[in-house]
Amino acid sequence: MQPDPIEPQARPRILATYPMPERVVAQLRGFADLTVLDGETDPQRVLDQCQGMDALICTLMTKVSADFVARLPQSVRILATYSVGYDHVDLKAVQARGLPFINTPDVLTEATADIAWLLLLGAARRGWEAQSMLREGRWIGWEPTQLVGADVHGKTLGVLGFGRIGRAVARRAAGFGMKVLTFQRNPGSGDPLPDHVELRGSLDEVLAQSDFVSLHLPLSEQTSGWLNARRIATMRPGAIVVNTARGGLIEEAALADALRSGQIAAAGLDVFVGEPKVSETILSAPNTYLLPHVGSATTSARDGMGLSLASDLEAFFAGQPMLSQVDTSV
Ligand code: GLV
């Protein structure tokens, strides 16, 4: 008697909430049936589309709350975010559901550090104001007092959060002859510090002793609103703030007040509270250099992010270990 034919292993079904780079789509289609939504952020509509899916690839635009996780169809066996940050995801709920969760570290480190430097230089040298003057036909020629900004070379840069991106920002500071101050919870862990980097005893000390501060902390309950009016008052008068991490790290009203009073000379911001809306508080504050969350927006970084998720998803469905699984227990 002929044996029953063996059921072919079904291809996993993956839902992505946003269009992705071609190389990423090709890799995912190599092992899975992929459905790509046209930039869907509404949790209910994402949940509706998840019916019968094995995996969900979302972005930081979808709030993965406890309620969202509870209502994810049982078919969904793994969650992926097209981002390194995951403050939009309720990790406790993900862990309670026993859902493996992957993100995209490493591949965007250098691109994001570059953008921190664009913001730092753009804020210090009044890049936006200068560009607007020129484009709007208000430039009437070189003047000794025109568009005078802050020196960068030789100053002190405080790097708040010394993970991969913070370190990459600090490395670049050597080329500008800057001293870097930072704080490490476990000093001595990781690679040795370069000569131009000095440790201080706390984030507050770093903040108080720096001419420029660049934020690279994860957003969490502990760090939400970290740069508030009280802390801003401890900063060097005329310091410059750069944020490529998450808008919620800064109390925007306090920052705007400090920009108006001159306590903070300028701010370079790639991230905002309540994105994609940018508050009137920030838009109307003086001396800002603002970008629409483009830290990782290079071809190699965005391809790398998607390819890293695709490789991990392929590994997951083949029962192999994944490289970028988030530890949801911490
Ligand atoms: C972008 O902000 C990211 O977390 O990847």
Image (cartoon, rainbow, N blue to C red):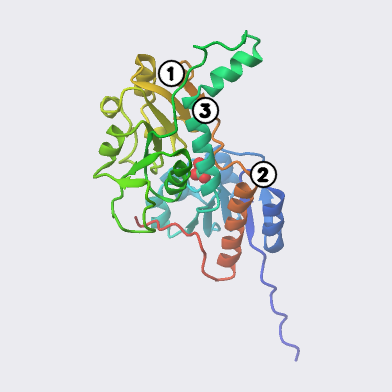
- The quadrant where residue 96 appears: bottom left
For residue 119, say whether it is visible.
yes
Q: Quadrant of the C terminus?
A: bottom left
N-terminal of the two: label 2 or label 1? 2
Classify residue 137 as left or right of residue 271. right
The residue sitting at the front extreme is 144
Crowdedness near tag 2: few (<14), some (14–19) or many (≥20) residues, C-alpha within 10 Å: some
Is the shortest distance between ligand 1 and the CB of mark 2 under 8 Å? no
As drawn, the label of residue 19 is: 2
Crowdedness near tag 1: few (<14), some (14–19) or many (≥20) residues, C-alpha within 10 Å: few
N-terminal of the two: label 3 or label 2? 2
- The answer to whether the residues at label 2 and label 1 have Cβ atoms under 8 Å apart is no
Classify residue 60 as left or right of residue 223. right
Q: CA distance from mark 2 to mark 1?
A: 32 Å
Give percent across and percent down for residue 94: 43, 53
- The quadrant where residue 245 appears: top left
Q: CA distance from mark 3 to mark 2?
A: 31 Å
